[in-house]
């Protein structure tokens, strides 16, 4: 049984081409209002969102994200930041000191940020907009922080291009359900076979979508993706921003 909301969620696909139509202010405001209604760990609300419309800033961010042209082409680019800066203020207002220590604080802020971002994307889609999240901003987090004037204790986690879709792409198939959902206890026995099946399904999809340029399926792509450390500069950046990870 489906609802309007579940049908919207289940028709998701990332959109990377947009028409020239601007996003009306009242639509954007409704999207941003939805951001703030995401649940939040202990209600810390440890995120901030920078709304970027200026062409110059979008161009800089597109470059910093590894030359992703949809970042400069979208009418609105949102940057979701994990943010303990205002919690530092809250502490100081009350004669306390923030202790931005340990991985847990960063996890809490990053989780809050991601939940807020997904709310934005769903809300935007309900208005007929399309979009794509952009983790590429973590390629050059210091550059992004400089462009956006981010203070200490703020970490750019992901960007989001938003605009009216100018493409109609096929949905990317997801893993078979048995590789994701488990009744009562994790059922590791079925995983290998489910991944074999997904390799075939996803290889077919990529072959269609790239007109034969990509023939590897998900397992082959992931084996090549997660076999090396990525964005190793993030640890130093996070520490420079005032988080102590140990
Ligand atoms: C946190 C996050 C970061 C992402 N970063 C990028 C990115 O930098 N560039 C991009 O084109 N897509 C990016 N994506 C989109 C994913 O590639 C996409 O969601 C995934 O391949 C599944 O495809 P679909 O969204 O069309 O279903 C990102 C998605 C997430 C959730």
Image (cartoon, helix red, strand yellow):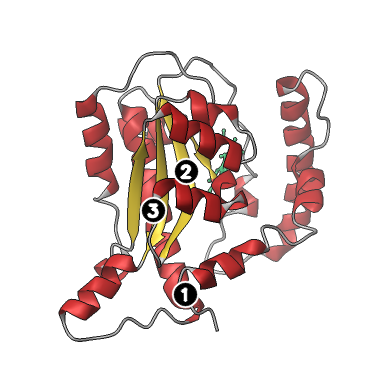
Q: Is mark 1 within 8 Å of ligand 1?
A: no
Residue 159, disc: 2
Q: Residue at x 62, y 50 (%)?
A: 139
Q: Which residue is mark 3?
A: 115
Residue 14 position within the rendered picture, expressed as x and y whole percent measured from the top left: 53, 31
Label 1 secondary element: loop
Task: Give the number of marks.
Answer: 3
Residue 132 position within the rendered picture, expressed as x and y whole percent measured from the top left: 50, 35
Inter-mark Cα distance, 3 to 2: 13 Å
In the rendered view, would you say 100 is above or below 153?
A: below
Quadrant location, the N terminus: top left
* Res 45 → quadrant: bottom left
Q: Residues within 10 Å of mark 3 (few under 14, many from 20)?
A: some
Residue 243, disc: 1
- CB under 8 Å between callouts 1 and 3? no
Residue 72, disc: none
Inter-mark Cα distance, 1 to 2: 21 Å
Q: Is residue 201 visible from the viewing direction of this image?
A: yes
Label 2 secondary element: strand
Q: Residue at x 59, y 54 (%)?
A: 180
């Amino acid at each position: 049984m489906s609802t309007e909301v579940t049908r919207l969620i289940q028709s998701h696909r990332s959109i990377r081409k947009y028409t020239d139509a601007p996003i009306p202010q009242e639509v954007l405001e409704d999207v941003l209002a939805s951001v703030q209604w995401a649940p939040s760990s202990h209600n810390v609300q440890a995120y901030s969102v920078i709304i970027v419309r200026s062409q110059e800033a979008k161009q800089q961010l597109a470059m910093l994200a590894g030359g992703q042209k949809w970042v400069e082409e979208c009418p609105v680019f949102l940057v979701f930041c994990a943010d303990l800066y205002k919690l530092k203020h809250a502490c100081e207002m009350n004669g306390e000191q923030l202790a931005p220590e340990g991985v847990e604080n960063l996890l809490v802020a990053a989780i809050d940020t991601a939940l807020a971002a997904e709310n934005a994307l769903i809300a935007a889609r309900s208005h007929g907009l399309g979009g794509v999240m952009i983790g590429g901003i973590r390629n050059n987090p210091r550059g992004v922080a400089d462009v956006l004037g981010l203070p200490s204790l703020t970490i750019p986690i992901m960007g989001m291009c938003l605009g009216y879709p100018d493409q109609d792409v096929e949905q990317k198939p997801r893993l078979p359900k048995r590789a994701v959902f488990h009744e009562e206890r994790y059922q590791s026995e079925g995983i290998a076979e489910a991944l074999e099946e997904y390799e075939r399904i996803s290889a077919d999809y990529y072959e269609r979508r790239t007109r034969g340029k990509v023939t590897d399926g998900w397992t082959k792509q992931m084996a090549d993706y997660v076999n090396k450390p990525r964005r190793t500069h993030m640890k130093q950046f996070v520490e420079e921003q005032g988080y102590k990870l140990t």
